[in-house]
Image (cartoon, helix red, strand yellow):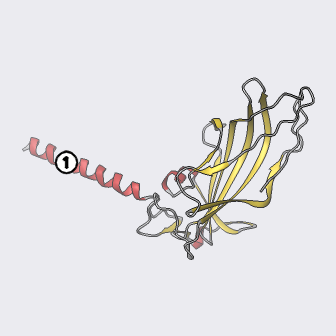
Amino acid sequence: MFLRWSLWMLLRLELLMLLFVVDSSRGIGQTYKLIVDDDYNLHEIPRTKDRQPLLVSASINVRNILEVDERNQLVSLETTLRLFWKDPRIKPKREYLQSFDSRGNYTNLHPSLADRIWMPDIFLDHAKTLRTPTFFTKPSSLRVYNDNTIRYSARINFDVACNMNFRNYPADDQSCELKFESFGLQSNQIHFAWIPDSINVNKNIYLSQFVFMAWILY
């Protein structure tokens, strides 16, 4: 009798764990701050009304240049990157729209929920190393606006390859390109665009052996 009961409990526990895994793979679920479509799937890109590529707008703050490694042709940067896109499947509940900025009313979510919603598969071309300056929690934030706009912001430090030409040394000029791309989606599915006047570069960046000039190309 005891053996049967134990076996039944074990099977029931395994079944519950299986159901939990299946449900979590669908996405964020019905959190208390959000209204989420029942058929939400984090692996599906948000739909657009006109079937145009999903627009992902971005802004970046270049906080500092940590190092210029001429020998290995690497530049280390300290940045904050913000991404904006619309997902009509997710909407904040009215009673939790307690914050406001230039885009409108929004609710804050814990950044860990970013693992349970669709996120742009963005990557930095020619990046050698990416680092997150973490103490206890990752320095990031997640917002959902009343118009279904989602904003994800994160602090990222990275080393990016920069082809350098020293023919005119010591009066040489070096240009380094930062190129953000989608890894798995094509241009007819997603479109990245910089928000006008949203690329901010710290004017107090000081390099002992270089004169830094920021050229912003959209």
- The residue positioned farthest toward the left in the image shown: 1
- The residue positioned farthest toward the bottom in the image shown: 50
Amino acid at pointer 1? Leu
| Residue 185 percent coordinates (x, y) | 54, 56
Q: Quadrant of residue 194?
A: bottom right
Q: Nearer the viewer, residue 193 or 153?
A: 193
Q: Nearer the viewer, residue 2 or 132?
A: 132
Q: Which residue is labeled 1 in the image?
A: 11
| Residue 124 percent coordinates (x, y) | 64, 44
Q: Nearer the viewer, residue 89 or 50?
A: 50
**Quadrant in the picture for the N terminus:** top left
Q: Along the horizontal axis of the image, is 61 left or right of 95? A: right
Residue 67 lies, with reference to residue 12, above or below; the image says: above
Q: Along the horizontal axis of the image, is 134 left or right of 178? A: left
**Quadrant in the picture for the C terminus:** bottom right
Crowding near pointer 1: few (<14 within 10 Å), some, many (20+)? few
